[in-house]
Structures are given as C-alpha cells and as structure tokens.
Image: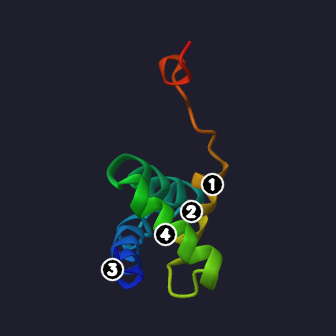
Amino acid sequence: MKSERLTEMANDIAAFFAADPDQDVAEEGVAEHLRRFWDPRMRQGLAELVRETGGADLHPLVRGAVQRLATVPVRVSQSALGS
C-alpha cells in the first residue's frame, strides 16, 4: 500500500482518538486499533515510513502508537515452533 494512503488512514484514526483529553489513552487507542484492524503488512509499512522519514506527515498520536507497537513482544504459539 502506498505510504500516502497509510498516512491518510492513520491520521484519520488519530483524529478520532485525539478527542480524548488523556494523551496516553489516545495513543494506546490508536495502537490498539492498528493491532486489531490493520494487516501486519500495513503496520510494517507504517513502521518503515516512520523509520525512513521520522513520520513528519503523521499525527503525533500515530508516531507514538507505532513506537508502542514496536515495543510489544510478539507471541508465538508452541505449535508454530513445532513443539
């Protein structure tokens, strides 16, 4: 997906959550939305965009959400490990 479209979609999500007066809650809301509803490739594309450009065109809540997503450990099922 093109970075312009990812930026537009992510900023729309952030605009919704920006109404929350608690920045931390709003940022986590964006992160949770991205976790639940975005395909992993879309999340990866957004993370790459932040790494490459610093996320200059992204709402601050999106930049914070991407950082939160990067620090969440990935859960791997035992069946995926062949155990």
Q: Secondary structure at mark 1?
A: helix
**For the point 58% across and 87% down, which residue is it?**
56
Q: Residues within 10 Å of mark 3 (few under 14, many from 20)?
A: few
Q: Position of residue 50 (x, y in %)?
A: 59, 75
**For the point 60% across and 65% down, which residue is it?**
64
Q: Residues within 10 Å of mark 1 (few under 14, many from 20)?
A: few
Q: Amino acid at mark 1?
A: Ala
From mark 3 to mark 1, how far is it between C-alphas?
A: 21 Å
Q: Secondary structure at mark 4?
A: helix
**Sequence order check: which comes first, mark 2 or mark 3?**
3
Which residue has dot 4 on it?
46
Q: Position of residue 77 (x, y in %)?
A: 51, 23
From mark 4 to mark 2, how far is it between C-alphas?
A: 8 Å
Quadrant (top left, top right, bottom left, bottom right) of the C terminus: top right
Q: Amino acid at mark 3?
A: Arg
Which residue has dot 3 on it?
5
* Residue closest to the eye, 83 or 8: 83
Q: Residue 23 is drawn in which quadrant?
A: bottom right
**For the point 54% across and 76% down, which residue is it?**
49
**For the point 48% across and 18% down, which residue is it?**
79
The label number, if any, that marks residue 70 in the structure image? 1
Residue 33 visible in the picture: yes
Q: Is residue 22 above or below residue 74?
A: below
The label number, if any, that marks residue 66 in the structure image? 2
Image-based side of 39 in relation to 23, left or right: left
Which mark's residue is nearer the viewer, 4 or 2?
4
Q: Amino acid at mark 2?
A: Val
* Residue closest to the eye, 43 or 29: 43
Q: Position of residue 29 (x, y in %)?
A: 45, 54
Q: Residue 51 is drawn in which quadrant?
A: bottom right
